[in-house]
Amino acid sequence: MNTRRDEEKQQRHEAILDAAETVFFSKGYERCSMQDIARQAGLSRALLYVYFTDKPAIMRGIILRAVQDLSARFAHAIASGKNGLEQIGNIGRAYFQFSQEQPHYFDALTQVSAFIDTSNPDELTLQLATSGEQVMHSMVSSLENGLADGSLGPERVTNPSKTAYYLRGAMHGVIMQSRLRTPADSDYPEPAEMVEYTLQMQKHALAP
């Protein structure tokens, strides 16, 4: 009986997040209210508050979905690479594809600091921290794999953790730069082309 009740509770939790995504992504977070989300979900506002304390909590739930999506993509990128260097390249492409296929999730991740309070974390904040660590762990693991299989140079990757942050920051910057280009930037490469160029530059910098 409890199992069925737990399943129904989880289904309603996900339905609320589905409704919130529809409202947030169409109208904008600041323009939406808890009442808007409740109406979209077909629930009373009182019942909505049983599941989420406020709008930031709902956004944390959406951001958690985004991180879990990205983590799954990174896991697939690693599984499809024959060595550490190839895995790192696959992760970079996966991050770019994520930004293209899930632009709202990508935007939500760039704003994560606005929706968490590390001094008084709730359950969603703790889950976000765990999922975020898994994303970085995937990158670090790929770099360690590359050092072990010889596809990465130990003189180039002296600290896998710092290197992972560098690679992610560099790719994020390229994606953001591509998203901000205007018609006036006629000489700027297509985003996919710029991503591949960046990956080639990183390959030359990391390979032995």
Image: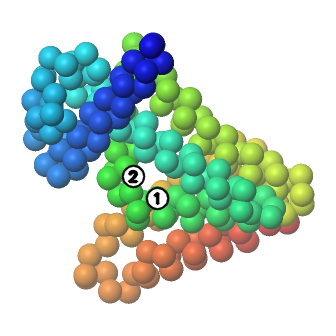
Which x, y percent locates residue 5?
A: 39, 18
Q: Are marks 1 and 2 in contact (CB under 8 Å)?
A: yes
Q: Which residue lies at the image location 39% right of the left edge and 52% below the top edge?
A: 106
Check residue 175 in the rendering and tell me which mark sits there, or answer none.
Answer: none
Picture quarter containing residue 202? bottom right
Looking at the picture, which amino acid does disc 1 mark? Phe
In the shown orientation, is residue 130 left or right of residue 110? right
Cα distance, mark 1 to mark 2? 7 Å
Check residue 98 in the rendering and tell me which mark sits there, or answer none.
Answer: 1
Which x, y percent locates residue 191?
A: 44, 75
Q: Is residue 57 among what the camera can see?
A: yes
State whether residue 60 is above or below residue 105: above
The colour mode here is rainbow
Q: Which residue lies at the image location 22% right of the left edge and 28% below the top edge?
A: 55
Classify the position of the N terminus by image quarter.
top left
Classify the position of the C terminus by image quarter.
bottom right
Looking at the picture, which amino acid does disc 2 mark? Phe
Check residue 106 in the rendering and tell me which mark sits there, or answer none.
Answer: 2
Which x, y percent locates residue 76?
A: 64, 56
Element carrying mark 2: helix
User: Which is nearer the eye, 199 or 71?
Assistant: 71
In the shown orientation, is residue 38 left or right of residue 67? left
User: Which is nearer the eye, 179 or 153?
Assistant: 179
Which x, y percent locates residue 129?
A: 52, 29
